[in-house]
Amino acid sequence: MTRTLDPERDSAPRDERDVALGALSDSLGFLLRLAQVQVFDRFFEDLGQIGLRPGEFSVLWVLHLNPGVRQGLLAQRLRVKRAHMTKMIRDFEARGLVERRTPEHDRRAVELLLTPEGTAFVRDHAEAFFTHDIRRPSTLTEAERAQLFTLLQKYVGLGPREGR
Amino acid sequence: MTRTLDPERDSAPRDERDVALGALSDSLGFLLRLAQVQVFDRFFEDLGQIGLRPGEFSVLWVLHLNPGVRQGLLAQRLRVKRAHMTKMIRDFEARGLVERRTPEHDRRAVELLLTPEGTAFVRDHAEAFFTHDIRRPSTLTEAERAQLFTLLQKYVGLGPREGR
DNA sequence: CGGTTTTTGTCTACTGGGAAACAAGACACT
DNA sequence: AGTGTCTTGTTTCCCAGTAGACAAAAACCG
């Protein structure tokens, strides 16, 4: 596992694929970033016309599955900061997609519910959201794709039936 | 491959892992985001004390491997916008790590070189940068880790010897 | 009860990064 | 030569997301 500092080249590269990456090709963070940029680009190619952002739809989706969830809990699960969740939720509220409710037993908290409009929005776009990347021709075979999913889920601790 | 709209639950979740994600667990974009957040957190836990950001070091590293590369080409390869690359490079220049040079044959372009300080910086931090996540105890076995790398590389088009 | 600590959401200020417009140079084509 | 078109880096403006301080409410604890 010797990781050499490759010696510098002499001629400056002229084409993108001539730019050597060296050990960066084996950096998990770098690979994840490239993959995410690619997914992002494809997402907007396919679904850009709808006013639909991946993060926003994810929130609505989880809200649909967990009516009455507290705002902070949602942020925690989706790995966004509470401050940012506040912005998103207030925006949703202004657009009439989400209702905020303060429970009596804890008047600090805010419980969230989809409005009928929010529910309709999720219903109308869920199919496109969840299948757009599957319908895409990929460099991966179906088996490889499934394998990638399994590995990522395990890496982030979303195993088949394990909470944490 | 029926993807059902799971019916709503009745009781609001009280704990993070009670928040159902449904089909989101099978969304590539979502998984990549979770993974990247995790890598990011670990990175700063390990290397935060050094003034070292993943993106910035990547630039210096690639510069080390490709002296004289044009600025735009670098941006293209690392999938960042040219505008952003401009900011980073000017910052590096101000910190004395990178030298900008305008070639005579094309006076629009900017060719980049590491200064001796920049070279030293890369030399001093490369080891830590490239091995920090490997030394981390992971939920993945070594074989799974290797498999994940291979799949990600193939997905983003960084195959063993294929340019594009 | 009263005082301290913790939780929950919000606010303000800041940063990383993108979009779009721009200037200067190179190129192409008469 | 001239005149458009393309490329390269830069500038300006904007937005998503974060950090940190904050207020209100709850929980804890004497």
Image (cartoon, coloured by chain):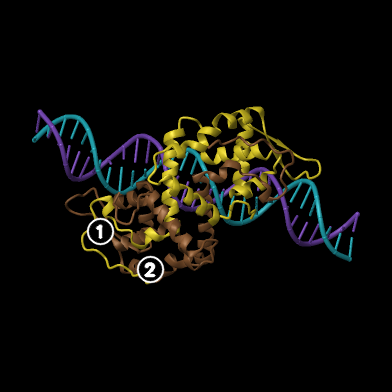
Chain colours: A brown, B yellow, C cyan, D purple
Q: Position of residue D14 (x, y in %)?
A: 52, 52
Report the residue at 61% width, 28% height from top: B120
B37, above or below A130, in the image: above
In depth, the one of A13 and A45 nearer the eye is A13
Whether residue B82 is visible, yes or no, is no
Chain hosting mark 1:
A
Q: How far apart are marks 2 and 1 (CA)?
A: 18 Å
Residue A121's disc number: 2
Q: Do labels 2 and 1 share a chain?
A: yes
In depth, the one of A124 and B39 nearer the eye is B39
Report the residue at 60% width, 38% height from top: B61
Q: Which amino acid type is shown beneath numbered disc 1?
A: Gly
Residue B161's disc number: none
The reply to whether dot 2 and dot 1 touch (C-beta < 8 Å) is: no
Q: Position of residue B91 (x, y in %)?
A: 60, 35
User: Which secondary structure, mark 2?
Assistant: helix
Chain hosting mark 2:
A
Q: Which amino acid type is shown beneath numbered disc 2?
A: Phe
B120, above or below B159, in the image: above
Report the residue at 65% width, 39% height from top: B65
Report the residue at 53% width, 33% height from top: B127
Label 1 neighbourhood size at 10 Å, few (<14), some (14-19), many (20+)?
A: many
Whether residue B161 is visible, yes or no, is yes
Q: Quadrant of residue B124?
A: top right
In depth, the one of A112 and B24 nearer the eye is B24
Assign the C terminus of chain B to one quadrant of the image: bottom right
Label 2 neighbourhood size at 10 Å, few (<14), some (14-19), many (20+)?
A: some
Label 1 sits on residue: A68
Q: Position of residue A162 (x, y in %)?
A: 29, 52
Q: Where is residue B27 in the image (x, y as percent from the top left)?
A: 42, 60
Q: In which quarter of the image is residue B21?
A: bottom left
